[in-house]
Image (tube, grey):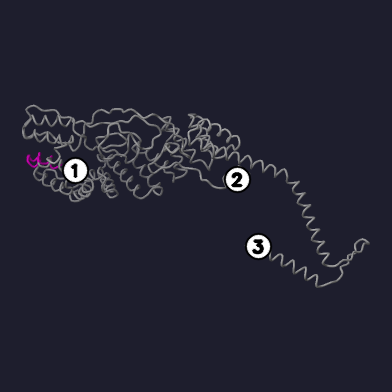
Amino acid sequence: MIRVVFFLIVVGVLALGAAWLADRPGDLIVTWQGMRMKTSPLVMAAALLVAVAVLIFLWSIVRAIVRSPIVLARRRRERRGARAYAAISDGLIAVGSGDIDAARKLSADASRLAPGEPLTLLLSAQAAQLSGDRDGAERAFRAMASRADTKALGLHGLFIEAHRRDDHESARAHAEEAAATAPTLGWAGRAVLEARCKDGDWSSALALLERHRGAMDKATYRRQRAVLLTARALAAEESDREAARNDALEAVKLAPTLVPAVALAARLLAQGGYLRKANRIIDTAWRANPHPELAQSFAELRSGESARDRLKRIDALAKRAPGNVEGALAVARAAIDAREFARARSALAPYLDAPTKRVALAMAALERAEGDEGRAREWLARALHAAPDPAWTADGYVSDRWLPLSPVTGRIDAFEWRVPLTGMTSTAPVIESEPVLVAPAEPKAEPIANEPRDHVLPLPAHDTAPAPLQAQPARPKSDPVIPLVHAPDDPGPEAEIVEETEPEPDAKPSGWRKIFE
């Protein structure tokens, strides 16, 4: 619309000028080197316009001739850039679809047409990974790591390749460099954090978590800080009880339902005489998540109290989470110690139709306390084939105690209190599948001949004697590539958590101009 208005204005101005000259007749005489030319102003104006047009036309021809080498070179580069774009696009599609031969060929074409371009390097690395050429992939990633615009992607690729060849020192070095270069990279922060946790350097891990606080949501930050504080408190429990108690209390404040933090804080508070505060934090955690470690810590809060008084406190705790088997087991344990066998039997009665291992062991302890050795042996036999109880499980690994990170994948806060599944494999993002370690908990109980009646079979808070670790068959190994493009059924090497997608280069419209120019 603006162009139309501008055109009409120009035409109107020219028409007014022509009319103005036509309304003012006269002669225009030009004398030059003995020649005398006489014409009207209107004709002279028309001649001048024609002369200007001719000069412009001649200048355009001369300019086109002079600039023709530059124009031809530019058009050649544009054609070359278009071919490079097609090669890179088709190559990435071939990588995503798993066509090794096409990916290798198109990668070679892209390297010839657009050497050194970021996407060319990425295609070369992915084609090399897909074909199993580890050295070629590492060369491409090193080339990317040496450039400012692709350094993060190159370091990520080097990190993955180092993990694949089990070079954990190099992997850690690449992650440290990436975290220092770009603090917002989630994978780098996690890798460095997990490495420091594996070394037991909890203070350094906490400092790193603080630096990367802005790269994670508030809930994740609070939970991970609570886990790290709990780990540091457990490590310092014997050497510095005051520092351990402060760390445990801060962890409870950040995650009030984190069982290991609550149990440790309650134990340290009880040792310092802060019984009311210890009782309060256990009560809060118990209402949200009844757990045997909480029941054990609650039972040990008051030293020197009678077994009947302890039974009263445990019974009150169990009523805060009615209908939960952990409360029943805690009451049964306290009732056996207080020699109130009827109370223990009534607490366990709702769970005898399909008893778990711990329920069967509790009944064995009860029968032995009452002097019926035969029925105690019967319950011990039933315990061998009873359903398993919940245990601390992470990535298919079963532990008799909570750990701050998984021994299989190194993930922080990986352990969950749930029933383990034998042969279960991890769903966490790992570089390659490894044999999964499973420690099925088997009860160990040996009858003691002529045992005094005052000593009954102890009822453990949970199974503490797991059988030897058994390696389960590993899944077939795969060699995924850094996922810029994925096939629909290929989640890539680090599908998440998550949390976590692979960093992709920014698709800026100006990126291809570097090829065309």
Q: Nearer the viewer, mark 1 or mark 3?
A: 3
How many C-alpha atoms fall within 10 Å of the one at disc 2: few (<14), some, or many (≥20)?
Answer: few
In the rendered structure, are the residues bearing label 1 and label 2 in contact, judged by CB atoms less than 8 Å apart? no
Please give the residue where the numbered disc 2 appears in the rendered image.
Answer: 513
In-front residue for pair 284/128: 128
Label 1 to label 2: alpha-carbon separation: 67 Å
Locate residue 167 relative to residue 305 in the image: left or right.
right
Instruction: Residue at 33% x, 37% y: name it.
Output: 200
* Amino acid type shown at disc 1: Ser
**Image x and y of residue 497, in percent:** 37, 42
Q: Relative to 483, does residue 222 appear above or below in the rendering? A: below
Label 2 to label 3: alpha-carbon separation: 33 Å
Give the farthest residue toward the right: 34
Q: Which segment is the magenta one?
A: 330-345
In-front residue for pair 443/412: 443
In-front residue for pair 104/202: 104
Locate residue 55 relative to residue 491 in the image: left or right.
right
